[in-house]
Image (tube, grey):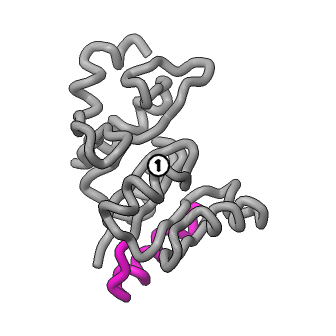
Amino acid sequence: MSLLLVRIDDRLLHGQVTQGWGSVLKPDRFVVANDTAAGSDWEKEMYETTAPEGVLVSVLSLSETGDRIREWIEAEEGILLLIENPSDALTLYRAGLMFEVLNMGGLHHRDGRKRILPYVCLDSDDIVALEDLRDHGVMIECADVPNCERKDLFECLGSTASGI
């Protein structure tokens, strides 16, 4: 099969992803690419119990993710990849995990971030990483749930990017 969706969501794997995106895309496996979660047995167990019955969950470090995903794609699995932030997405891309579209679905407010959409808040480091991905030909789309209108991040930013 393929890499069905590459999604940035700071909550990683949760109900909106499993029920919303999962029910539409029907992945064989959710992959959580996150160094912190990969190092925590508790977090791994929590994510594994979040997925619907019959859907596998793998929680991997960023360094493990690319090779493992390529193996699963060669084995014809459909993968929904979850990444916590733009810097991690860029790290995976630079490590050779190529994707054409990056879905921004949930980067929530924290100090230093500016609200771009109700579900996307970015800081200057996020913008730099996303611009780098865009410059490599990756389309950055914003959509919190599958049935909402998809928006181009940089169209939403307009001149805002310079003010972040």
Q: Is residue 73 above or below residue 51?
A: below
Query: Which quarter of the figure is the C terminus placed in?
Result: top left
Q: Specify the segment rendered in magenta.
A: 61-78
Q: Identify the residue shown where x is 60% and y is 67%.
A: 60
| Quadrant placement of the N terminus | bottom left
Residue at image x 46%, y 33%? 126
Q: Which residue is located at x 30 percent, y 73 percent? A: 2
Determine whether the residue tagged by mark 1 lies in a helix, strand or loop: helix
Tell me the kind of residue under disc 1.
Gln
In magenta segment, residue 163: no
Residue 43 is left or right of residue 156, and the answer is: right
**Residue 135 at x, y percent in the picture:** 26, 41
Residue 90 visible? The answer is: no
Image height of 15 relative to 107, above or below: below
Q: In this view, does 21 lie above or below 128?
A: below
Residue 46 % position (x, y): 69, 61
- Residue 16 visible somewhere in the drawing: yes
Can you name the residue that lies furthest to the bottom here?
Answer: 75
Residue wearing tag 1: 16
What residue is drawn where x is 45% and y is 46%? 8
Residues 43 and 26: in front is 26
Magenta: main secondary structure equals helix
In the rendered image, the vertical position of residue 53 relative to residue 142, given as above or below: below
- Total numbered labels: 1
Q: In this view, does 116 lie to the left or right of 107?
A: left
Tell whether position 68 is magenta: yes
Along the viewing direction, whichever of 152 and 63 lies nearer the viewer = 152
Counting from the top left corner in percent of width and height, residue 128 is at 41, 32
Q: In this view, does 61 lie to the left or right of 27?
A: right
